[in-house]
């Protein structure tokens, strides 16, 4: 049953040779006593000519077959220039059906997204069939090439691949843990890691200095289109470093991936922007730099305004809708609906006339003073025929609304340079953000070090302190993020104090890390990349599930195996789920 050739590799030079192929019947056409088969295996497709009408008629799509035959040049006019094997065909001398196929839940050949496309859940439910299709299989191949390049680059840079436990204690990355009951210790539970964070820091205490791992992570979060409960990180940690080492390593890794997989030369170093600038200019901590249309801060312009909506707001900002001055009432209303869909009350706007002045008829313009109107187009960066949308309120949410609006306008107006790759480091994130309960939580995670200026006073002003944290972003997508860590026990304790973790809690949750830090921990830091996201970007899709072999559905369940499932009373007893420790 051994095949001698992969179907997709046959070329004109093979003509005259006997071959044995094995694969699946992708297509079958009968032509006056002759059956033409497209035989597909992992390498591609070859045409097989079968001169046994009975055997030909017995075949159906996706039968698994073995074919003995001779390679021949296709008769004149029958070549298929779209197929690498398009100049040849295999004239079969014998065909053996290895296994038959039931009726298919969806056609294997045919377009994935166009007419006849298949619903996602059905694809995941029959993923083993979906992966027989060309594009889905190519996406997995791209992912495999990506991880292979990653390993090559990491090893060339002397990084050591280390596996850390999956059955462990909670790692604080801001999500809920998945918990695993332990039969032998009823009432005790493991947590699946949200990231290898604590272990990689321990490996630095251990003196390994350069660690990496392609690690599965588990986060029990609310369902979102671009998240799944388990995902893969490229996780990296180094000792005796500063931010520049992480930036240089990342840039060398990403330029290699983009060059080898996409044939794109990325300029280095990547641009850099502080978090504060990113929010101020783009209303996002992962700005898409493929177009301009920056936000403007009009807080100064409207200081002392009598317009109620803007008065006494800490922040008034704006974004321009180019050409928006000529929108119909209905089109303007649809932007209001867009804003309401995001939970905003609406969007105040003014229209700029063809003379470059604010049209005074609008609902906002009539509340503004003459001085406010005169300077407004220039202050907002608007030209003749544009519209200006405003957001007023607390700075961060107002900027985020404008940032999302900027993106929506960019898409709507075709302003985004689709073929460009704009990489960016976002740096100097805040250390903490307020919690709903009036306390503080770490923006990155509580092991992140403050910037030198904040080292001695972040505890006094938690809302203002800046972290040595960084994200690498491309075209508005966050590819990875990390930080320089705290390696002194006193400072770590201060952070725990700010986030309201008592000594006892800190001890019980992270005592093992704090203890390790008593034994000469080196300065260290690192980064983690979302590999599913990165593979999706490299494969040219927005959908991370396309680059996962067996993805969960948007509901978090697995349509293929039916997981998660209820357990039996017996399993429940055995796992000790109801036992109080
Ligand atoms: N553990 C972090 C994360 O999962 C990454 C890092 O700080 O290296 O986001």
Image: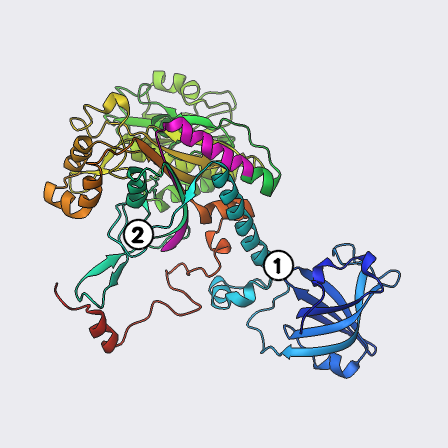
Instruction: Give the camera-side residue of 387 and 255.
Output: 255
Looking at the rendering, the stretch of residues picked out in magenta corresponds to: 228-256
Point out the tag, 1 or 2, that comes first from the N-terminus. 1
Looking at the image, which residue sits at the far right?
76
Side (left or right) of 129 relative to 450: right
Q: For residue 240: magenta?
A: yes
Q: Quadrant of the N terminus?
A: bottom right
Q: Position of residue 361 (x, y in %)?
A: 40, 28
Is residue 265 visible in the rendered image? The answer is: yes
Instruction: Kindly state the secondary structure of the residue where label 2 is placed.
Output: loop
Q: Work out whether 547 lies above or below 573.
A: above
Where residue 473 appears, as percent x and y from the top left, is: 44, 36
Q: Quadrant of ligand 1?
A: top left
Q: Are marks 1 and 2 in contact (CB under 8 Å)?
A: no
- Image coordinates for residue 530, horizontal then vertical, percent: 42, 45
Q: Is mark 1 within 8 Å of ligand 1?
A: no
Q: Which residue is drawn at the image coordinates 24% and 58% (left, top)?
A: 190
Element type at mark 1: helix
Would you say residue 229 sits in the magenta stretch? yes
Residue for badge 2: 193
Residue linked to disc 1? 134
How crowded is the residue under tag 2: few (<14 C-alpha within 10 Å), some, or many (20+)?
many
The quadrant of the rendering that contains the C terminus is bottom left
Q: Is residue 66 above or below residue 217?
A: below
Q: Image height check: is 41 above or below 474?
A: below
Q: Residue 181 appears in which quarter of the rendering?
A: bottom left
* 78 w.r.t. 217: above or below: below
Label 1 to label 2, Cα distance in Å?
34 Å
Which image quadrant for residue 130?
Answer: bottom right
> Of 456 and 327, which appears nearest the observer?
456
Q: Nearer the viewer, residue 438 or 372?
A: 438
Q: Position of residue 534 (x, y in %)?
A: 48, 45
């Amino acid at each position: 049953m051994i095949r001698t050739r992969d179907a997709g590799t046959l070329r004109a030079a093979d003509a005259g040779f006997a071959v044995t192929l094995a694969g699946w019947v992708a297509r079958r056409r009968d032509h006056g006593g002759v059956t033409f088969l497209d035989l597909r295996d992992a390498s591609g497709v070859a045409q097989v000519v079968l001169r046994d009408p009975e055997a030909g008629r017995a075949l159906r799509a996706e039968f698994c077959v073995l074919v003995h035959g001779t390679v021949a040049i296709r008769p004149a006019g029958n070549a298929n220039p779209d197929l690498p094997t398009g100049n040849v065909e295999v004239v079969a001398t014998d065909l053996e059906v290895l296994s038959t196929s039931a009726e298919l839940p969806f056609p294997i050949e045919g377009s994935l997204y166009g007419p006849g496309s298949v619903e996602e859940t059905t694809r995941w439910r029959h993923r083993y069939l979906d992966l027989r299709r060309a594009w889905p299989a190519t996406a997995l191949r791209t992912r495999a090439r990506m991880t292979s390049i990653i390993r090559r680059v990491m090893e060339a840079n002397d990084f050591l691949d280390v596996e850390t436990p999956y059955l462990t204690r909670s790692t604080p990355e801001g999500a809920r843990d998945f918990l695993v009951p332990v039969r032998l210790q009823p009432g005790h539970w493991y947590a699946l890691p949200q990231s290898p964070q604590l272990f990689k820091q321990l490996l630095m205490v251990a003196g390994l200095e350069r660690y990496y791992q392609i690690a599965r992570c588990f986060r029990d979060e609310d369902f979102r289109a671009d998240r799944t409960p388990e995902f893969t990180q490229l996780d990296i940690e180094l000792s005796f470093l500063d931010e520049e080492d992480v930036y240089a390593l990342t840039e060398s890794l990403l330029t290699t991936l983009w060059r080898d997989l996409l044939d794109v030369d990325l300029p280095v170093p990547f641009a850099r922007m502080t978090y504060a600038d990113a929010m101020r200019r783009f209303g996002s901590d992962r700005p898409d730099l493929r177009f301009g249309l920056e936000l403007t801060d009009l807080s100064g312009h409207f200081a002392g305004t009598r317009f109620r909506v803007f008065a006494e707001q800490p922040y008034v900002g704006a974004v321009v809708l180019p050409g928006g001055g000529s929108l119909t009432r209905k089109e303007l209303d649809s932007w209001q609906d867009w804003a309401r869909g995001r939970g905003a009350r609406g969007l105040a706007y003014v229209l700029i006339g063809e003379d470059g002045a604010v049209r005074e008829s609008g609902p906002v313009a009539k509340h503004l003073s003459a001085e406010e109107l005169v300077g407004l187009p220039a202050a907002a960066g608007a030209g003749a025929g544009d519209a200006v949308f405003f957001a007023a309120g607390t700075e961060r949410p107002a900027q985020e609304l404008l940032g999302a609006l900027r993106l929506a306008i960019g898409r709507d107006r075709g302003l985004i340079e689709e073929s460009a790759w704009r990489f960016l480091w976002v740096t100097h994130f805040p250390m903490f953000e307020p919690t709903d309960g009036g306390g503080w939580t770490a923006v990155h995670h509580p092991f992140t070090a403050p910037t030198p200026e904040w080292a001695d006073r972040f505890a006094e002003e938690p809302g203002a302190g800046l972290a040595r944290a960084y994200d690498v972003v491309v075209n508005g997508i966050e590819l990875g993020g990390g930080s320089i860590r705290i390696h002194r026990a006193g400072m770590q304790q201060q952070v725990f104090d700010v986030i309201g973790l008592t000594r006892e809690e800190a001890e019980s949750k992270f005592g093992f890390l704090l203890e390790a830090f008593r034994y000469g921990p080196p300065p260290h830091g690192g980064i983690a990349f979302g590999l599913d996201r990165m593979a999706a970007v490299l494969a040219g899709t927005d959908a991370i599930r396309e680059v996962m072999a067996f993805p969960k559905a948007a509901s978090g369940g697995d349509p293929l195996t039916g997981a998660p499932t209820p357990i039996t009373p017996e399993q429940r007893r055995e796992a000790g789920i109801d036992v109080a420790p």
